[in-house]
Amino acid sequence: MDAGQKRYLEKRYEASEWHGRGQYGKRSIKGFTFAGSEVSGWKLQRVERDENMKPLFTHSLWSRGTAAAEMLSIDLWECRSIAAAHDQVFEVLANMESGEIERCPNGPGDVAFGLADTMILFARVNVVVLIRNAGSKVVVVRAVATGIDAVLVKRLRVETREKR
């Protein structure tokens, strides 16, 4: 993404209000991977983690029901810091070709963006999550995003207790 596009996104999405800041300060999550229980009511079909990519990248595919018409693609980036995660949010937004994506002030994570509940992009501390429909039937993704965010928050709290 070039500097002009980043400035445009920062202004459009009011980055001065949230970039580099979050509820959990400078805490971070390390080594997160999908095991299959993170998304209630959905079955993990495939997970691929690219340890060589910076930031670390995990792609997963989930299904619900028997016909495989309801499918979700969930991408996750594990960044080195909250500021780096927020920069990754801009990278993802820059690669989307929709002017309809809006910031979701009451969304999951420290900052969230969505497209009519069919796509949610959010960051919680150093982790960025993108949830999109991948099947022929459109599914509302907000509950899935909220559930994954709860898993991340739980992991944060456990890791914080373990460090004490």
Image (cartoon, rainbow, N blue to C red):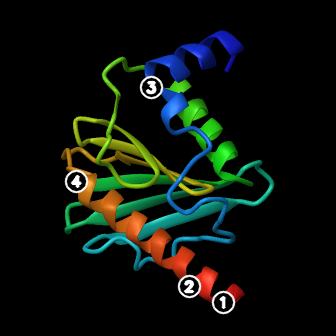
The residues tagged by marks 3 and 2 sit, at their Cα atoms, a distance apart of 32 Å
Q: Amino acid at mark 1?
A: Glu
Which residue shows up at 63% across the image and 56% down it? Answer: 126
Pointer 3 local density, CA inside 10 Å: few below 14, some 14–19, many at least 20: some
Mark 2 nearby-residue class (10 Å; few <14, some 14–19, many ≥20): few
Determine which residue is flagged by label 4: 69
Q: Which residue is mark 1?
A: 162
Mark nearest the camera among 1 and 4 is: 1
Tell whether label 2 touches label 3 (CB within 8 Å): no
Q: Is residue 72 toward the left or the right of residue 162 in the image?
A: left
Q: Tell me what residue is drawn at x 20 percent, y 61 percent.
A: 67
- The part of the image, by quadrant, that contains residue 68 is bottom left
Q: Secondary structure at mark 1?
A: helix
The crowd level at tag 4 (other Cα within 10 Å; few <14, some 14-19, many 20+) is some
Q: Nearer the viewer, residue 1 or 105?
A: 105
Horizontal relation, residue 159 to residue 56: left or right? left
Are the residues flagged by discs 1 and 4 in contact, CB closer than 8 Å? no
Q: Which residue is mark 2?
A: 158
Mark 1 and mark 4: Cα distance apart in space: 41 Å
| Residues at discs 3 and 1 in contact (Cβ within 8 Å) | no
